[in-house]
Each structure stands twice: as C-alpha cells, then as structure tokens.
Image (cartoon, grey):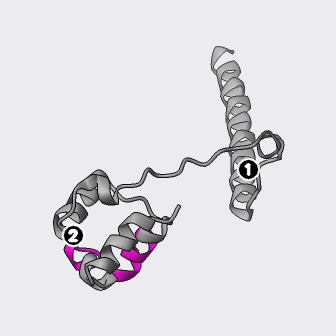
Amino acid sequence: MQKDKLRTIRKQKNYTQQQVADALTTDVSNYSRKESGDVKISEEEWNKLSKFLDVPLEDIYEEEASKKITNEESQRAPSVTPEDDLNVELIRNLLDYIALLKEENARLKEGSEN
C-alpha cells in the first residue's frame, strides 16, 4: 500500500526522496520502495520521518496493509520451485542412507552376539 500521506507531505515540504533517504541513512531506491509500500517502514523510521519532516507522526503514518488470503487462494496448491525439488530429493537420499545404516548396524549387532 502506497504511503500517500508521507509522499504528499514530503512533496509539500519540497524534499526529494534522496534527502529523506539520507535522513533515514538508507539509499534512495530503498526509500522509494518504502514510500511505494513495497518495503515496510519500521517504527523507528516512522519517528525519524516525523522529526525530519517536522510534522506529527499522525500526519504521515499509514498502517501496513496485511495481505488478505481468500478462500480460493488458500485452497490452491503451493508453488514448487526447482530448489524445492532438490530439497525433496536430498531428503529422500538421506532417508535411504539412514535406512542402509540401520541395516548395517543390525548386521553388526548380530555378528557381535555370535
């Protein structure tokens, strides 16, 4: 969710995104993502912004939008990436190896008892 209140106040005060980014000690691309709502603004950053822009926090603060998951989305199968396939294969191989070790351990126990 875009931070329209923040953007409006910044522009009214004639500050560039670079100037605000400098006040937050971040780079301009990161600040731009914060202002556009792509990156969360921390509580500490909200307070710094309020002081830098010399406005009450309420004048610029906007809640982070929580993603609402629809029933349709929750019933969809999760997406699988090639990395997930690799992890599944690795786990299968490890389980097979553990089974072999257990068999070998059982054989060794039998041999030591005789």
By secondary structure, the bulk of the magenta-drawn segment is best described as helix
Residue count near mark 1 (Cα–Cα under 10 Å), binned few <14, some 14–19, many ≥20: few
The residue indicated by pointer 1 is: 88
Image quadrant in which you'd find residue 30: bottom left
In reply to whether residue 81 is colored magenta, the answer given is no
Q: Which element is circle 1 on?
A: helix
The residue indicated by pointer 2 is: 53
Residue count near mark 2 (Cα–Cα under 10 Å), binned few <14, some 14–19, many ≥20: some
In reply to whether residue 33 is colored magenta, the answer given is yes
Gap in angstroms between the C-alphas marked 1 and 2: 51 Å
Residue at 68 percent across and 23 percent down: it is 111
The three-letter code of the residue at mark 1 reads: Val
On screen, residue 109 above or below 41: above
Image quadrant in which you'd find residue 51: bottom left
Q: Is label 1 in contact with label 2 (beta carbons under 8 Å)?
A: no
The three-letter code of the residue at mark 2 reads: Leu
Residue at 70 percent across and 42 percent down: it is 97
Residue found at the very far top of the displayed protein: 113
* Residue 35: percent from left, percent from top: 42, 70
Image quadrant in which you'd find residue 14: bottom left
Residue at 30 percent across and 52 percent down: it is 58
* Residue 69: percent from left, percent from top: 69, 44
Residue at 70 percent across and 19 percent down: it is 110
Q: Which mark is residue 29?
A: none
Magenta residues (range)? 21-34
Residue found at the very far front of the displayed protein: 12
In this rendering, position of residue 58 left or right of residue 76: left
* Residue 12: percent from left, percent from top: 31, 78
Of the numbered discs 1 and 2, the one sitting upstream in the chain is: 2
On screen, residue 114 above or below 4: above
In this rendering, position of residue 64 left or right of residue 50: right
Q: Which element is circle 2 on?
A: helix
